[in-house]
Amino acid sequence: MISNAIARRYAKALVQLGAEEGAVDRFGVELGQFTALLDGNADLASVLKSPAYRIEAKREILRDVLAKLNLSGTVSNFLQVLLDRGRIGFTPQIAHSYAVFADELSGIVRPVLTSAFPLDDAQVEGMKSALAKATGKRVELSAQVDSALIGGVVTKIGDKVFDGSVRTQLNRIQDILQKG
């Protein structure tokens, strides 16, 4: 829980810097590149996170990595601050929070639509336009299939879930019948 609060704080600061510089998308890509590098290189991540290594050695390693990635000065400085404050291990959570804040700033929502059967393009576009109208934001819809729903759809937008599935309706009927 605390790590999420820390990640959100750093992510929000970087999004604000990105907005000031007109580089929100670029910063997101660069942060993603660095995060992917850490995910793919456990030794590098371990060294940068470990208190067993001197901070000067970790700074030098980070500088070399950042030079090879050719990141912007702002993102490079941001990552150096994370290293200096012992927060480099939060980079994946920061990248996730950054994407959320960047979407908010850009007026984008990324709902997940789950249906019992595959939807055709017209149905997906219809749902997309209905969600855009309801939220007043640009919609980047992700569709998936879960046959356990029996029928209907479940739409998740952030923390909100709109459940119009047959499975949920049957469960409600069952609860009513059991309660008498």
Image (spheres, helix red, strand yellow):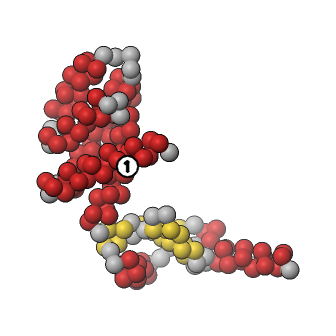
Residue placed at 35% from the left, 34% from the top? 87
- Which quadrant holds residue 147? bottom right
Q: Quadrant of residue 168?
A: bottom right
Residue at image point 31% right, 62% down = 103
**In the shown orientation, is residue 78 left or right of residue 94?**
left
The quarter of the picture where the C terminus appears is: bottom right
Residue 174 placement (x, y as % from top left): 78, 76
Q: What residue is disc 1 on? A: 8
Q: Judge left or right: residue 133 versus residue 166.
A: left
Q: Determine the image quadrant of residue 49.
A: top left
User: Is label 1 in a helix, a strand or a loop?
Assistant: helix
Residue 83 location (% of width, % of height): 29, 30
Q: Residue 43 location, x and y as percent?
A: 37, 24
Kindly tell me whether residue 83 is visible in this rendering. Answer: yes
| Residue sitting at x 58%, y 78% | 164
- Residue 176's spot in the image, x, y percent? 78, 79
Whether 1 is drawn above or below 123: the answer is above
**Nearer to us in this view, 77 or 174:** 77
Type of the residue with mark 1: Arg
Q: Residue at x 15, y 55 (%)?
A: 20
Relative height, residue 167 to residue 88 (above, below): below
Within-10-Å neighbours for mark 1: few <14, some 14–19, many 20+ = many
Q: Is there any visible trace of residue 122 in the rendered image?
A: no
User: As drawn, which residue projects farthest toward the right?
Assistant: 180
Query: How many marks on residues?
Result: 1
